[in-house]
Image (tube, rainbow, N blue to C red):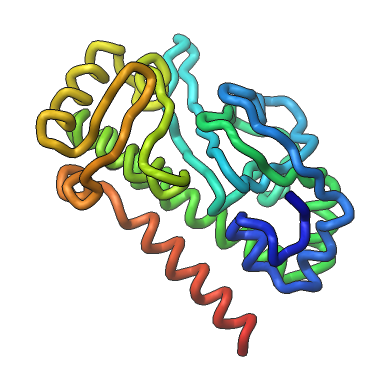
Amino acid sequence: MDTEQNSVRNKLLKALRPDDYELLRPSMQIVKLNVHEVIEQPRVPIERVIFFETGLASVIGHLSSGKSIEVGLTGREGMSGSAIVLGSTEATHRTLVQVGGYGIAVSSSAIVDAMRASDTLRDVFLTYIHTLLTQTASTVVANGLSKLDKRLARWLLMIHDRIDGATVAMTHEFLALVLGVRRPGVTVALHILEGKGLIRASRGQITIINRQGLELEAGGSYGQAESEYNRLMTDILARQVS
């Protein structure tokens, strides 16, 4: 792996103007991302921002009672460090690696300096934060209005968008965490999707075998945030050409 712009897989880095990309490149470092590695902690200064090349991470919200649920998901379409982009220095939630892989780390100070130096770079990053907020809003709607099996279908589609292949390593315990439910509920939801021929679940692994069926099963809870991301990124790329 190298940090030449034409070699990276991260969609945000690829969308940058070449001169904007070069503002970040001196600070770039390729890093391995291990499963369950914590990238950000609440009220802890963010020292680096990760642009995911492979793998993905969950942003986990917590109640004072100790209960947790996933409030955001990012992979090669995005970056960690949304607080840095928005002018803060500390995270509000915990972010941890859900699927292991590799990323490109850039120091938070380099991100801030680059945003001050380039309006076009800043606009790309702010556009991504907008789509992340749209995703979070969609998650709130799904969690409040959809049954667990439909929420699981949506979540699997989001995972599928961000990984290579159709199989993801995932325990029932972690699924219970990101969906904010007890483990028996996860088991029931997996059995429902498997019974409909949409997935195949084995110990520690889930394989998507009918994506179109999963989209129907999600019942409209999937797609809005994804369409917004594609629309805005298309606009960014078009402006660069013009």
Find residue 205 and report its horizontal and vertical position in percent: 36, 25
Which image quadrant is residue 210 in? top left
Seen at 16% across and 49% down, the residue is 216
Find residue 206 and report its horizontal and vertical position in percent: 33, 29
Which residue of the protein is positioned furthest toward the bottom in this rendering? Answer: 242
Seen at 16% across and 43% down, the residue is 217
The vertical placement of 20 against 9, above or below, is below
| Residue 75 seen | yes
| Residue 108 seen | no
Which image quadrant is residue 46 in? top right
Q: How many marks?
A: 0
The vertical placement of 185 against 44, above or below, is above
User: Is 16 left, or right, of 228 in this rendering?
Assistant: right
Seen at 81% across and 44% down, the residue is 29
Which residue of the protein is positioned furthest toward the right in this rendering? Answer: 26
Q: Quick one: quadrant of the C terminus?
A: bottom right
The vertical placement of 88 against 144, above or below, is below
Q: Nearer the viewer, residue 180 or 74?
A: 74
Q: Nearer the viewer, residue 4 or 27?
A: 4
Seen at 40% across and 41% down, the residue is 159
Find residue 223 and report its horizontal and vertical position in percent: 31, 55
User: Is 41 left, or right, of 220 in this rendering?
Assistant: right
Q: Nearer the viewer, residue 232 or 77?
A: 77
Find residue 130 and report its horizontal and vertical position in percent: 51, 56
